Amino acid sequence: MTTEPPALELTRVVKDYKGLRPLRIASLVARRGERLAVSGLDRPAAEALIGLITGAALPDEGEVRVLGRLTSAIATGEDWLASLDRFGIVTERVALLEGSTLAQNLALSFTLAIDPVGPDVLAKVLELAEEVGLSGSSVQDRAADSPSEARMRVLLGRALALEPAILLMEHPTASLAPDAVPAFAEDVARVGTGRGLTSVAITEDETFAARAAERHVKLNPATGEVSDARKRRWPW
């Protein structure tokens, strides 16, 4: 019987990204359909890791495999652009159109004709908005007037719109109020499970990790070793 390779596998990876030290990862594996949280990376290191996973950058040492394929085997720009279809990325580095509504920002995943959004696309937008926990009325608010939680849900929706196999999240709760985190985390878990996605969230938010992920690991940036972040801490 053939066993499918993991969705994501990093082995003995070293990448100099001009930080205090190179990014080191001894071994990190995400199984297909797994919801994984990874701690121990600041924003620059998280951005470097996302680049390695998507093939935007290659490791200085070691290997990165996505769905069994080495990122170093991506030979052309056209091949790399095609490979990006496997990923949905939630990051605040992606800007919203502040003067447009949340619905129009979601519609950008499907079309550039967003003023107005056509009826066929609007139907997709409303379905996507409901899936990520946005109410039908809130999607008509301007992005500039919307709370951080709604904006993050739009970014989640845009990441999901083209039905990726792997969802990558880069410190997704950094701008959220603490009381907004539990509901957002539970919706991330619900969406990931419902779609059968592999999801990898880079986060220092323990509340988010506990509710959104099945497994939570912590990277030691000095050694590259990855350990279970949920191990019981004895009081003595």
Image (cartoon, grey):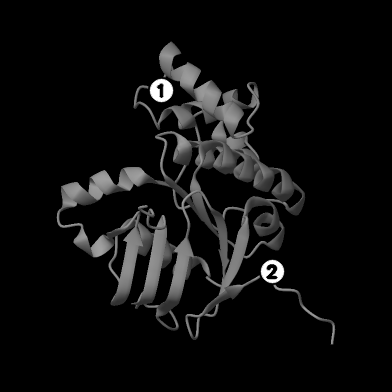
Residue at far right of view = 235
Q: Position of residue 15 (x, y in %)?
A: 35, 76
* Label 1 close to label 2 by CB (< 8 Å): no
Eye-nearest disc, 1 or 2: 2
Q: Position of residue 23 (x, y in %)?
A: 42, 77
Amino acid type shown at disc 2: Arg
Name which quarter of the figure residue 95 lies in: top left
Q: How many marks?
A: 2
Rendered view: 87 above or below 64: above
Label whose residue precedes the other's in the sequence (1 or 2):
1
Query: Is 109 placed left or right of 130 in the picture?
Result: left
**Viewer-side residue, 204 vs 70:** 70
Query: Is 27 placed left or right of 188 in the picture?
Result: left
Q: What residue is shown with label 1?
A: 114
C-alpha span from label 1 to label 2: 44 Å
Q: Position of residue 114 (x, y in %)?
A: 40, 23
Rendered view: 182 above or below 111: below
Residue shown at the point (53%, 70%) measured from the top left: 42
Category of crowding for the residue at label 2, using alpha-carbon neighbours closer than 10 angstroms: few (below 14), some (14–19), many (at least 20):
few
- Secondary structure of the residue carrying numbered label 1: loop
Name which quarter of the figure residue 116 lies in: top left
Q: Using the image, tell me which numbered label, if any, was put on residue 230.
A: 2
Amino acid type shown at disc 1: Ile
Name which quarter of the figure residue 39 lies in: bottom right
Residue shown at the point (42%, 19%) measured from the top left: 121
**Viewer-side residue, 224 vs 146:** 224
- Secondary structure of the residue carrying numbered label 2: loop
Residue shown at the point (61%, 57%) measured from the top left: 174
